[in-house]
Image (cartoon, rainbow, N blue to C red):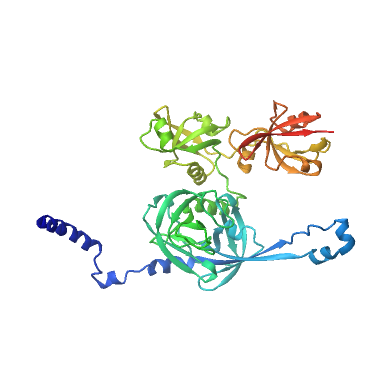
Amino acid sequence: MRRTLLVIALLVTPALAAAQSVPQSRAEITLSFAPVVKRAAPAVVNIYTRTVRAQRGVRFRGDPFFERFFGDFFGQSRQGRRRIENSLGSGVIVGEDGLVVSNYHVVGEADEITVVLADRREFEAEVIFTDQASDLAVLQLDDAADLPVLPFRDSDSLEVGDLVLAIGNPFGVGQTVTSGIVSGLARGGNGSRQRGQNGAGYFIQTDAAINPGNSGGALVDMSGALVGVNTAILTRSGGSNGIGFAVPSDLVARVVEAARSGEMRLERPWLGVQAKPVDGELAEALGLDRPEGVLLEGIHPMSPLAAAGLKRGDLVLGLGDAPVDSPAELAFRSATLGIGGTADVDFVRRGQPMSAEVALAPPPETPARDPRQFSDAGRLSGLAVVSVNPAVQVEARLPAEASGVLVTGLAGPARRSALRRGDVIFSVNGEAVNNTAELERAIRVRNLDLGVLRRGQRGSVRIVNG
């Protein structure tokens, strides 16, 4: 027994010694991130914003009872008052001429923006491009030139375990650097919690500490190249718990390119599908060795995937030579490809691997929106609607199979109906409604039973006119 234990000890000890060995040279003792920080930090800026918001009105203003006793006291005390909101964040210089990328929730609605460089120079800035869906915004600094710039790295080349640094201005203490690793790739944003975040997206996950004020700052690799823009954290306390998210540099580069070219918004190719990720149970039902890809649950008749031959029930594995394992990743891949040209889509149908070429085009405006607001429709007077088409589906985040008319506004008597802005009316008294003209004709009766799609759930709204 002693001989056996001795052999095991002799086998294990050298491995442990190698893993836990002390530095053997002066160079190893002085290993540091400092050279990386010196390259990257000058291109990361602090951002200070000032936003003016209108003060909310007094609840009882205009009420005859309160005006009798208090006169116009409430109106005089509140009328014309404004609330000033100050906030801070970070940004990354991506152009020598003063082009800076940050988060939309940091600068997107600001009235005044001041950018402070690492060398303490200050510049006024204005927002020249926003993409709220990716929580990104691009700023132009006034009278800036020859600024330090961070180069982009292909975020698809990242691997879990890669060392990264997060640089920003947490809590306004000044430029701060934290280190960590890439903890995960292709993360959906459903768990992220940070003011301004809508939870949608596709992120790089890192354990490098990210705190309030880091938003819009840089996530860089060990060569000082930009791999992501820090945007959100998973937290219950408001501070870092070691789970942070960054927008991948591939999408950041697309947004910057759109800003440079003078585009008004980031055009994303429209796929026109409703997809779900594949879990273990579904993989077994599909005869797969392991869960992979996304299953097409719905596909719009005008979808470019439908034109390429794909059908409901197909399993999409990749788009544009990149794997796809979630609906968020499918949207991300299409966004990075941009408008124009084609891309290959790899999919499986009944166990057979297949491939097709898909056009990269924006959502069509067919049929026309034909916006209308009804003025003589009884209890629906004041109802504003547009016909649902693919472009409307994208803007309102409707499912690919949604059809009918979208409620865009409620005024007058319509405000007292059970309808809500964002509802889709798909039928009236059991008859399908395809556009605003059909709805206007269909509501000219006394009793109305409206088929309504609200937040993905179908229901009905009953209205009696007269």
**Residue 415 against residue 451 in the figure, above or below:** below
- Residue furthest to the front in view is 1
Residue 166 % position (x, y): 45, 62
Residue 449 % position (x, y): 73, 30
Which quadrant is home to the N terminus? bottom left
Which quadrant is home to the C terminus? top right
**Residue 133 against residue 240 in the figure, above or below:** above
Tell me, yes or no, if residue 201 can be seen here.
yes
* Side of 110 where 188 appears, left or right: left
- Residue furthest to the left in view is 3
Q: Quadrant of residue 377?
A: top right
Front residue of 78/151: it is 78
Residue 33 % position (x, y): 38, 67
* Side of 372 where 226 appears, left or right: left
**Residue 86 against residue 226 in the figure, above or below:** below
Tell me, yes or no, if residue 71 can be seen here.
no
Front residue of 295/30: it is 295
* Side of 454 where 204 appears, left or right: left
State the residue at coordinates (56%, 36%). 272
State the residue at coordinates (51%, 43%). 331
Residue 424 % position (x, y): 67, 36
Q: How many marks?
A: 0
Front residue of 88/427: it is 427
Front residue of 342/40: it is 40
State the residue at coordinates (48%, 63%). 149
State the residue at coordinates (74%, 29%). 438
- Residue furthest to the right in view is 68
* Side of 60 where 283 appears, left or right: left
